[in-house]
Image (tube, rainbow, N blue to C red):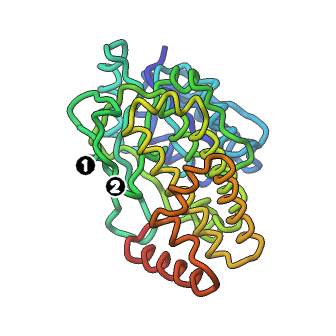
Amino acid sequence: MKLLSVAVPCYNSAEYMSKCIDSLLPGGEDMEIIIVDDGSTDSTPEIAEKYRAAHPDIIRVVHKENGGHGSAVNTGLSNAAGLYFKVVDSDDWVKESALHAVLDYLRQAAGSSPQLDMLVTNYVYNKVGEHRHKVIHYRHSMPADRIFTWDEAKRFRKGHYILMHAVIFRTGLLRECGLKLPEHCFYVDNLYVFEPLPYVKNIRYLDVNFYYYYIGRTDQSVNQEIMISRLDQQIQVNRLMVDYFTSRECRQRTNAHPPLRAYMYNYLEIITTVSSVLALCSYTKEDMKRKSELWEYIRSRDYLLYHRLRYSVFGISMNLPGKGGRDLTVGAYKAARHFFNFN
């Protein structure tokens, strides 16, 4: 069995996928790199096959019909033979020294007791045009010297969450929780770092800058204009998060762990805020209707959750009355975005 499986979803990634794959190859034969060609129409399939021919003991290639990022992650997971599983997007990369540190730790963790369910590392925003890159770390939220449980985790600051870039899951855990991401839908990474959490018992934080998250392509899904154009998909993911959070399964697994329940609520709150503010920035009747329908959907699923979200500071600011209220919220959002330099 391999120690770590890394899925690399690729769709028309010919221009940049080599940097990603080359950054993973120093991991050697303890790893398998699963290149998932998601129905590419450029030279991605040929590049993938060249890598497989050059590194047959490390590289695996799966060609499939286009199904979107979630479908590619699902395919990577179903083909994974490693004890642990990581997703690295084809326009991102990892730091070699940190990769060796991660593998060294996973070797120690393999077969140990208690069983490691989730490894968390730092990630770096590699934003075009900036000389200094922002490092997202978890030093104030997680102990860094031992395995710990949710009940030992510290409080996460608002807007500071565990994203896909930061996590490595135990492969068996992802299969146990039945994770299956929606196809032909963007922003499913929020589900990837949400639905498995109630199954996670033992966590380790490794304070290394491992994952480099590239920001700069105009066609990236996190570009604000593109996010507005795909608001229906953002809201689809938002609804699925509401469904899961209010499900009996989630309640049963989280009620005994208040810090985990609080973390998941806060993450759901920020995603709902993102959905709402994008609708406000759109200024179209169609998107304002989508926003109203989202809030009504939350009310129909769980009134107490709706009440808590709606009358939080974020909820009130997202639902100020009239055009003046909308303008005030959008202006505050733009100012905050400029000041804090977030995407």
| Label drawn at residue 203 | none
The image quarter in which residue 118 lies: top left
Label 2 neighbour load within 10 Å: few <14, some 14-19, many 20+:
few
Q: Nearer the viewer, residue 109 or 180?
A: 180
Q: How many marks?
A: 2
213 up-or-down from 130: above or below = above
Separation of marks 2 and 1 at Cα, in angstroms: 9 Å
Q: Position of residue 221 (x, y in %)?
A: 61, 59
Q: Position of residue 300 (x, y in %)?
A: 69, 50
The image quarter in which residue 290 lies: bottom right
Asked if the residue at tag 1 contacts the one at tag 2, i.e. Cβ–Cβ closer than 8 Å, the answer is yes
Q: Amino acid at mark 1?
A: His
110 up-or-down from 286: above or below = above
Which residue is farthest bottom? 324
Q: Amino acid at mark 2?
A: Arg
317 up-or-down from 144: above or below = below
| Label drawn at residue 140 | 1
Q: Position of residue 29 (x, y in %)?
A: 44, 22
Residue 277 in sight in this render: yes
Q: Does dot 2 land on a helix, a strand or a loop?
A: loop
Label 1 neighbour load within 10 Å: few <14, some 14-19, many 20+:
few
Residue 12 in sight in this render: no
Which residue is farthest left? 145
Q: Position of residue 325 (x, y in %)?
A: 57, 82
Judged left or right of residue 63, residue 212 is left
Q: Which residue is mark 2?
A: 157
Task: Identify the residue shown where x is 45% and y is 37%.
Answer: 24
Which of pointers 2 and 1 lies earlier in the amino acid sequence?
1
Task: Identify the residue shown where x is 23% and y is 29%.
Answer: 146
